[in-house]
Each structure stands twice: as C-alpha cells, then as structure tokens.
Amino acid sequence: MRAETSPFEDGTVGAIVNVDWFVPELLCLFTKALKDGGYLLMETIKGHGQNYLQLPPLGYIRSALYQSFDIKYCSERKAGPAASNAGSFRILAIKRNSPPI
C-alpha cells in the first residue's frame, strides 16, 4: 500500500492499531479513515541501537494529532544519543467529531 492511498473509505473505520511501525504520511490516512469517536492506538519501535534513526522527533505525534484528536494517553521517551531529538512513543487518541459542513 502506498502512503497516499487507502483501502478504506473516509469515516468508516472504528479503530486503528499501529504497533512497531511508524510512517508519518499515514497519519493523514488514519485521520480520514477513522469515523468520529474512532480510536487510534499507536506505538513506535523502541529506541534501541540505531532504531532512533527511524523515530520521529519528540513532540511530533502530539502536534500532528492535536487538531483532530483528543489524546487520552501519550508517553514519549527520548531515544538515541544526546544530540538526537528522536523519541519513541505510545499514544491512545479518539477522533473528535467533524464540524458540520
């Protein structure tokens, strides 16, 4: 599956679980696919060894989701060497109701 296509129609999915695999471009597809009140549960790989090179910057996930989701739980941990801003995270978020058109 390419990051710009989805097998789901907009607003038809009740929950998405994404564990040990993080592709930032999928956040937009997840947001579109989830129906109002739908759950998003995500967890990245741990920051062991060189894994930090595949992790997003600290704070990225909150800023990427804050407009469309109520974040119920979020845990971030710094990963990599001191100069790195990478972080692993766990998050549970609920999609807010879309404004009426």
Image (cartoon, helix red, strand yellow):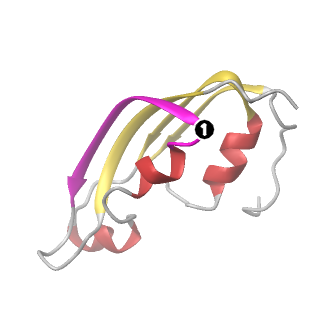
Q: Is residue 98 left or right of residue 54?
A: right
Q: Which residue is mark 1?
A: 68
Span of residues in magenta: 66-78
Q: What predominant SS class does the magenta segment belong to?
A: strand
Residue at the image position 72 percent from the left and 49 percent from the top: 29
Against 31, residue 98 (above or below) is: above
Q: Nearer the viewer, residue 90 or 47?
A: 90
Q: Residue 86: horizontal and vertical position, in percent?
A: 29, 67
Q: Quick one: quadrant of the C terminus?
A: top right
The stretch drawn in magenta includes residue 21: no
Q: Residue 33: horizontal and vertical position, in percent?
A: 76, 37
| Amino acid found under the numbered disc labelled 1 | Ser
Q: Nearer the viewer, residue 3 or 51?
A: 3
Against 51, residue 58 (above or below) is: above
The stretch drawn in magenta includes residue 68: yes
Q: Is residue 85 left or right of residue 71?
A: left
Q: Within 10 Å of the Cα at label 1, are there few (<14), some (14-19), or many (20+) other Cα atoms?
A: some
Against 54, residue 98 (above or below) is: above
Q: Nearer the viewer, residue 61 or 55?
A: 61
Residue at the image position 21 percent from the left and 52 percent from the top: 77
Q: Residue 57: horizontal and vertical position, in percent?
A: 35, 65
Against 4, residue 21 (above or below) is: above
| Helix, strand or loop status at disc 1 | loop
Instruction: Determine which quarter of the picture holds residue 94.
Output: top right
Residue at the image position 84 percent from the left and 44 percent from the top: 7
Q: Quick one: quadrant of the N terminus?
A: bottom right
Q: Does the rendering let one see residue 20?
A: no
